[in-house]
Image (spheres, rainbow, N blue to C red):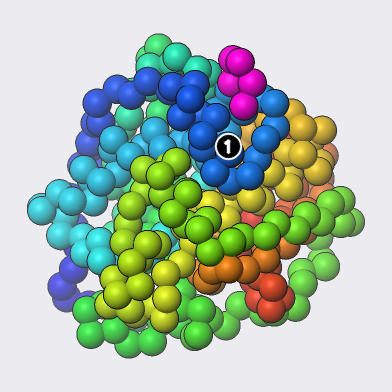
Amino acid sequence: MSEGQNRACLGRSYRGDPVVAEADAMRAFAQAVGDLNPSYVGDEPVAHPLFAVRLLRGLMPQLLADPALGCDRTRLVHGEQRFTYEQPVRAGDSVALEGVVAAIEDKRSGQVLRVEQRLLVDGRLAVLGEATAFIRAPEGTSPELDAGPGLDARQSMVSSEPDRSVGDALHVASHEVDAAAAARYAEASGDFNPIHLDPEAARKAGLPAVILHGTCTLALAARAIVDGVLGGDPMRLRGIDVRFARPVYLPDCVVTEVRRADPSLLHFETRNAEGEVVLTRGLARC
């Protein structure tokens, strides 16, 4: 590809206005993903592992909308996400936001954009994130597995067979996802990308219908990990990495299987009701 995002923006830093982690918003986020762990919904809540998505709404739209970068958000699909948790975000914390354009890579059917995300409380790093997005080429050829993350479900070559090569299965959790799940998550997360809400916008982006936010699916997997393996204690979750292999179309039922790799590392994978992988290469550090 000779067109697309501007490589002169590599290394460019962005700062969002500090945002307060409000207790009501923290509880609403947990409720929107069906996670009623007392740590998230109590009188003095700590942030759900994926609540960073809401906090980052003051940064990521600014970064992605930078005309110098030239990112076509209408063709963007979230491909991979990593979060490392250095300290908990608590109700009332003022969170500073920083982002850096870390990489721009050409693929056969588009480009990959990688952004480093930093959330700081009192000047100390609380959450370190890395978001990878796939931006489809305007005259889209069919994305293929080796063309990068953010794949079209109809073309994906991810195996439909479970990966049994890593450790023993520790926990399997099933979560029903109803037709209104994307709207609830958009309100709670602040991510109103129309491909999750507007069928016409989804079709223009090359999707057959609206899709659930990948980070909402990841929130369900985090629930399976924390409640099913870590004794309901989110403080034991030190980090989570994943690739979004397929979109989740609504309604659906997603099933997460968690396996032990070693004492401090879990592997997980999430599938839809058809048994197709929607989250792959999942790692949880504990």
Q: Position of residue 172 (x, y in %)?
A: 81, 56
Q: Which residues are magenta?
A: 41-45
Q: Secondary structure at mark 1?
A: helix
Residue at the extreme left of the image, as rendered = 68
| Residue at 43% in and 23% down | 21
Residue 124 part of the magenta segment: no
Q: Within 10 Å of the Cα at label 1, are there few (<14), some (14-19), or many (20+) other Cα atoms?
A: many
Asked whether, in this view, residue 246 is left or right of residue 18, the answer is: right
Whether residue 245 appears in this view of the structure is no
Quadrant of the image for the C terminus?
A: top right
Query: Which residue is more in the foreground, 130 or 27?
Result: 27
**Where's residue 249, x and y in %?**
52, 71
- Residue 2: x %, y % from top left: 17, 75
Picture layout, residue 9 above or below residue 245: above
Q: Quadrant of residue 236?
A: top right
- Main secondary-structure element of the magenta-colored stretch: loop
Estimate the x, y position of residue 51 in percent, counting from the top left: 50, 36
Above or below 208: residue 245: above
Q: Quadrant of the N terminus?
A: bottom left
Compared across the picture, whether 90 is left or right of 229 comes to left
Examine the rendered structure and indicate whether residue 101 appears above or below residue 44.
below
Position of 276 compared to 266: left or right? left
Label 1 belongs to which residue? 30
Residue appearing at x 46%, y 74% in the figure: 151
